[in-house]
Amino acid sequence: MDNFFGPFLARVAPGNCVLDLGAGQGTQAQWMARRGALVTAVDKKMPPSGLAGIDWIQSSIEDWFARLPAEARFDAILAKNVFQFLNRDWVLQQLLPDLAARLNPGGLMGIETFYQPPEPAFEWLTETAHYTLADLSAFFFNWKVLSKQQQPVRTRGLDGVKRKFFLTDLIVQRQAASAAQALAPAIEITEEFLSL
């Protein structure tokens, strides 16, 4: 188990409602289901055989997101090596804000993605999106940071070719806002309008 997923999995509790975006072969989904989590896995690929206790949705993330019910809520969301294959503006402006709002208080968000293209580049992929630790940390500025790192890692890709991957890893926890924090923006707006 790697240094990103291990700490994320350690915080997944039995009965947690977990979303695994870009679930791939279902490896992480299976680990979380074994811990007693209720896992929804989304991937374009057919579900691997032998997946028990996992609600597998075969779909692109964009199509799944468009059909996601308004009332859907999660205790943990894992996006391991998927954001780099999606439109960066869409991820930052629509997907991340919506998913963050769907996390229950105390909920976890785990993101692993590229901060620059791998070396050598994938032959089948002409373009990837990149997210530095600063990009993602700025988005989660008022969340509790549980783990963060940005580093090159040499390993084999899914195609079996050994590559140097440049990974951004971030695990954050949503905090329950106090009444004062929830009111602060409204107070600032009111004071601004009163001073006009």
Image (tube, rainbow, N blue to C red):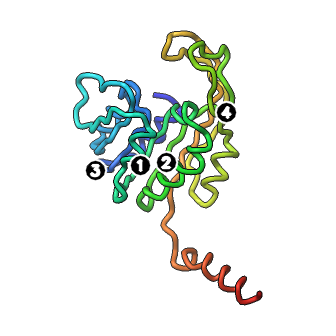
Residue topped by disc 3: 15
Q: Position of residue 143 (x, y in %)?
A: 57, 58
Circle nearer the N terminus (4, 3): 3
Circle nearer the N terminus (3, 2): 3
| Distance in Å between CA atoms under marks 2 and 4 | 18 Å
Residue at 51 percent of width and 10 percent of height: 160
The label number, if any, that marks residue 115 in the structure image = 4
CB under 8 Å between discs 2 and 4: no
| Distance in Å between CA atoms under marks 1 and 4 | 23 Å
| Distance in Å between CA atoms under marks 2 and 1 | 6 Å
At mark 4, the secondary structure is strand
- Is 179 situated left or right of 188 in this image? left
Label 3, residues with CA under 10 Å away: few <14, some 14-19, many ≥20: few
Image-quadrant location for residue 103: bottom left
| Distance in Å between CA atoms under marks 3 and 2 | 17 Å
User: Looking at the picture, which amino acid does disc 2 mark?
Assistant: Met
User: Looking at the picture, which amino acid does disc 4 mark?
Assistant: Tyr
Residue 53, compared with residue 47, is above or below; it is: below
Residue at 58 percent of width and 37 percent of height: 87
Q: Number of callouts in the render? A: 4
Give the position of the C terminus as an image quadrant: bottom right
Residue topped by disc 2: 109
Residue 83, compared with residue 182, is above or below; it is: above
